Amino acid sequence: MKKLIVTIAALALSLGAFAQINFGVKVGGNLANISGMVGEDSGLDWGDLAKVTPSQSMKLGLNAGVYAEYMVMPMLGVQVEANFSMQGVNTKVESTSSLLGGAASTTKQAWAANYVTVPILAKFHFGPIRAYVGPQLGFALGMNTTTETITGDNTNTQKDVVEDYNSFDCSLALGAQYKITANIGVDARYNIGLTNVFPAVKNDKGEELSEAWGKQGVLQVGVFYEF
């Protein structure tokens, strides 16, 4: 028992000797997506269209934040961040509509959502290379859409506020860093959405018409400065 106590005490002292806190700031770009925005299972009603060619693409945005990393031991740290992240998705529908007398039209819709994200990461150090993984909590500040409809020579643009969405998002963050100098480095990560952006659609009787849908995926590339 005495040997066990001595061993635990020695381990605790050794970890305490390694413990330190690193602070930093980061900024970069996003390529964001929301799954299932087009297609039969999207949950969106594209109208009474005879011929439809829907597609979606990633939305470009910015991210910036601050972080603190507590070094548990030389090769392992726990990093907590507070970030601002511009996310969303772009959709496009090319159609020939029976409602427009067979006229061709193109509808482009940009979904934009700003989030405050809080990743909690286990970070592994291998010289100048770091790898990390952990959960990320996201809190939406708002979501809106910009819809551009082009029919012949006519273009109509409309902006709307989206109200029916989940303001909380949970993701799994996976990434790596490379430290170029003692203070400056580059960072790349991918956030895999675990929760649905849009809730289930229900009728007036409370009957579920479609399941909750739309998971986020965000590729982030940027630089950081560590104090």
Image: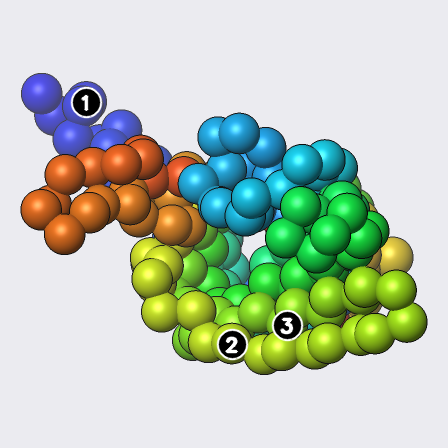
Marks 3/2: CA distance? Answer: 7 Å
**Residue 168 placement (x, y as % from top left):** 33, 58
Q: Alpha carbon of mark 1 to alpha carbon of mark 3: how far? A: 68 Å
Q: Who is closer to the viewer here, 127 or 5?
A: 127
Q: Tag 1: residue type?
A: Lys
Q: Which residue position holds label 3? A: 146
Front tag of 1 and 2: 2
Q: Name the element at disc 3.
A: strand
The outermost residue toward the front is 101
Q: Quadrant of residue 50?
A: top right
Indicate which disc residue 3 carries: 1
Dot 2 amino acid type: Asp
Residue 3, quarter of the rendered image: top left
What residue sits 33% from the left and 62% below the top?
164
Q: Secondary structure at mark 2?
A: strand
Nearest the eye: 44 or 154: 154
Mark 2 residue crowding within 10 angstroms, few (<14) / some (14–19) / many (20+): few
In this view of the protein, can residue 73 be seen by the observer? no
Nearer to us of marks 1 and 3 is: 3
Mark 3 Cα-neighbour bin, 10 Å: few <14, some 14–19, many ≥20: some
Residue indicated by mark 2: 160
Q: Position of residue 60 (x, y in %)?
A: 75, 62
